Image (cartoon, rainbow, N blue to C red):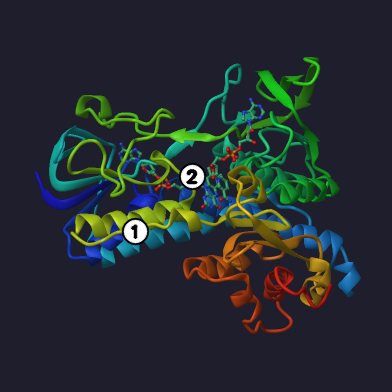
Amino acid sequence: MSSYDVIIIGSGPGGYVSAIRCAQLGLKTACVEGRETLGGTCLNVGCIPSKAMLHATHMLHEAEHNFADMGLKGKSPSVDWNQMLAYKQKTVDTNTKGIEFLFKKNKIDWIKGWATVPEPGKVKVGDDIHEAKHIIIATGSEPASLPGVEVDEKVVVTSTGALTLNKVPKKLVVIGAGVIGLELGSVYARLGSEVTIVEFLDAITPGMDGEVQKSFMKLLKKQGINFVMGAAVQRTDATKTKAKVTYKLRKDDSEHVLDADVVLVATGRKPFYDGLGLDGLGIELTKRGQIAVNDHWQTSVNGIYAIGDVIEGPMLAHKAEDEGMAVAEVVAGKHGHVNYGVIPGVIYTHPEVANVGATEEQLKEAGRAYKVGKFSFMGNARAKAVFAGDGFVKIIADKETDRILGAHIIGPAAGDLIHEVCVAMEFGASAEDLAMTCHAHPTYSEAVREAALACGDGPIHM
Ligand code: FAD
Ligand code: NAI
């Protein structure tokens, strides 16, 4: 039996970041991970492999669509699928090995295996029982299931199977027009699959700014992605090589069937805590089945904390990381803090989509007076030079005080541009503060400044 100040269960972005911060704060730390490699969903089957596939297929798209216009003539590249998968795996391996290195560097013990918590202060892995003053649960999430849809990870797949298909499907049906459906749908559309996305609601990416939703869908349609909106999937019927997807249109209850070589189920994820023994410990859950925590990420049981996808809030790697650092500070007797009002969200399609803070829809509902500054990338010289003039930056500020309340960007490098607004919001800045900051020319960032200018006397290049 070994004894630790902290044992963290799960080595995803929540768990591994927390482990590193705990060790940096002088705590004797171990992290239990049941997978063969560290890094959790994000590094192994989530953020990292999906971004590698998005990058590779975006390069293909550029070669096919824009190279000739720039005077780069010749045959566009053909796809070596196995090599693309090998590139993706190499990217994953480099990152997971990187975490192993960081664990060694910070003297964190990796306890290999699946953990249970038989009682507070104890963590059981295999036949070994380890003692810990503090336990942090960071066990993440898994794909939510859908009634009538049986996943085999070959023909009917979740994102995990979609990242390791043995060939590019001719016809891909995606259930759910959320983040996973749109990112992986884009990957396969660029590879030549006929992609149809079936969505229950009438708009894609629920919760996102309405103008962005519309513009985003229009651009994705232009890229050849088909959408069936307002459709409730009833069931899938699969053989070893094909599937049929039956859905009902909500407007008239009519039933329709789509043929597919592969069906991707992307209808959300749910917290994962199987086998931990939460019932026996009396750990309380929220109504939505997440582990309930207080402001210090403490569960209903003293000394047991939880962070990341397994608790409430957006299921995002950086949200889990922030909680990982903050809870480490708490267990080390310091003050941990996460500003939940300033957590950006990014969709890594082309163009990228990014948001932070409030949407117009939310502010209207709350009855808050606001103003909007908008600037199109068509007015941005750099974007136009690289065939990236689609999209816009939209900044929302308080009508009276000019304080920035939110930003919504669809366009080139949106996922990077959003952080300028995040920093501004952290400092309680006004749109005028952003507008008065000198921005280098020619950069995409100028579009952010122009949107800020549009909150006041108006943009220059529009
Ligand atoms: P996880 O990363 O899920 O890690 C939990 C770990 O705990 C797992 O490795 C699991 O094996 C381990 N574990 C569970 N139970 C036990 C146990 N009893 N004992 C031992 N180990 C256990 N988010 C973004 O911010 N950006 C993105 O681009 C992005 N892309 C994504 C793409 C896809 C396809 C998917 C599926 C998700 C994506 N996400 C993205 C979401 C992101 O992956 C999650 O929000 C993030 O991984 C959550 O981190 P976590 O530490 O809470 O849990
Ligand atoms: P999601 O919650 O983003 O989207 C699910 C979609 O499926 C919604 O549009 C919903 O209306 C629809 N839906 C639900 N039931 C349906 C049904 N029966 N028929 C048709 N449509 C249905 O979930 P998704 O895409 O599975 O992603 C899961 C999580 O992973 C997200 O919370 C996201 O935060 C995270 N993620 C983040 C990424 C990023 O940050 N870039 C990338 C990928 C995933």
As drawn, 213 above or below 173? below
Chain-order first, disc 1 or disc 2: 2
Residue that numbered label 1 is attached to:
337
Q: Which of these two is toward me, 434 or 398?
A: 398
Outermost residue, front side: 400
Location of residue 348 in the rendering, given as x and y in whole percent from the top left corner: 64, 55
Q: Residue at x 13, y 38 (%)?
A: 129
Could you tell me the amino acid type at mark 1?
Answer: His
Q: Which of these two is toward me, 25 or 366?
A: 366
Q: Is residue 200 left or right of residue 35?
A: right
Q: CA distance from mark 1 to mark 2?
A: 18 Å
As drawn, 213 above or below 405? above
Q: Is mark 2 within 8 Å of ligand 2?
A: yes
Residue that numbered label 2 is attached to:
315
The circle drawn on residue 230 is: none
Q: Taking the image as drawn, is residue 83 in sight?
A: no
Q: Which of these two is toward me, 40 or 443?
A: 443
Which image quarter: residue 412? bottom right
Q: Are marks 1 and 2 in contact (CB under 8 Å)?
A: no
Could you tell me the amino acid type at mark 2?
Answer: Met
Q: Across the whole image, how many numbered discs are drawn on residues?
A: 2
Q: Residue at x 79, y 21 (%)?
A: 251
